[in-house]
Amino acid sequence: MNVVANPARMHGVSETEWRIRCDLAALYRLVAHHRWTDFIYTHLSARLPGPEHHFLINKYGVNFHQMRASDLVKIDTEGNVVEQGDLSSRKVNAAGFTIHSAVHMARPDLMCVVHTHTSAGIAVSAMKDGLLPLSQHAQKFYGRIAYHDYEGIALDLNERARLVGDLGTHKAMILRNHGLLVGGSSIAEAFHMIYMLERACAAQVVALSMGQPVVLPPHAVSQHTSDQFHSFESDAAHYEMVWDAALQLIEGGASDHRS
């Protein structure tokens, strides 16, 4: 993607950080484009390179479809804003900090984390059997998805250990009675993960609403398909191809996310 010059108000931001800011802002707008938002709630984050374990998350109160690179807030794993300039308006969602800091502290392989509250995601999270392997999209997560029981609004920092304990080595997790959580080794992979999981949940809700028995593939077929999807994870070019195509959906808006 093209990256515009770093504006003066973001002085002290490296080229690498600015590029990550631009990509994460684009991801926010793509989430809005696909109607996966919950007004100003939910959150996406991206880890910044370096030993400080800093990561970017949205400034609380900004609509996702209007998110700009300069709206993202750099924080540490204690929730402190670590930026230059006036920090009085750089507020972040407390529950967002709890969830995202937990993953970033425990899973250095997950550079980007996405959390959504869609109707389909919440509906599947409330189902006893969770995500069913009834669509090709769902097969991607066959045997590769975790579950975390609901504990209330995620304001208790003690929940972080339980959350990452349930996540384990997976890249996707259903938060019971709450929503979806995915991570990726890049922003492009995280987008692909949430796209596939949201589509899988939406298909399940529609299929079960039809009042007819559903057909589930045999275990061997589901496992084979999951393994096929898993083989893509070492192919960054595949995710970048999907990401480049997705970016075309948000080009040409009234404002530029790269500002």
Image (tube, rainbow, N blue to C red):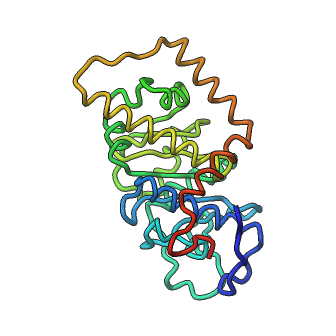
Quarter location, residue 235: top right
Left or right: residue 225 compared with residue 162: right
Where is residue 175 shown, x and y percent of the image? 41, 43
Q: Vertical placement of 4 versus 191: above or below?
A: below
Q: Nearer the viewer, residue 165 or 47?
A: 47
Where is residue 190 shown, x and y percent of the image? 59, 48
Q: Vertical placement of 144 versus 109: above or below?
A: above
Where is residue 200 shown, x and y percent of the image? 44, 35
At horizontal 62% and vertical 29% (from top left) the residue drawn is: 229
Quadrant, the C terminus: bottom right
Q: Vertical placement of 68 versus 35: above or below?
A: below
Q: Vertical placement of 73 versus 198: above or below?
A: below
At horizontal 38% and vertical 31% (from top left) the residue drawn is: 130
Left or right: residue 80 compared with residue 32: right
Q: Nearer the viewer, residue 177 or 165?
A: 177
At horizontal 50% and vertical 27% (from top left) the residue drawn is: 136
At horizontal 53% and vertical 75% (from top left) the residue drawn is: 255
Where is residue 140 shown, x and y percent of the image? 55, 30
Quarter location, residue 121: top left
Q: Disc count in the image?
A: 0
Q: Nearer the viewer, residue 113 or 193?
A: 193
Quadrant, the N terminus: bottom right
Left or right: residue 65 compared with residue 101: left
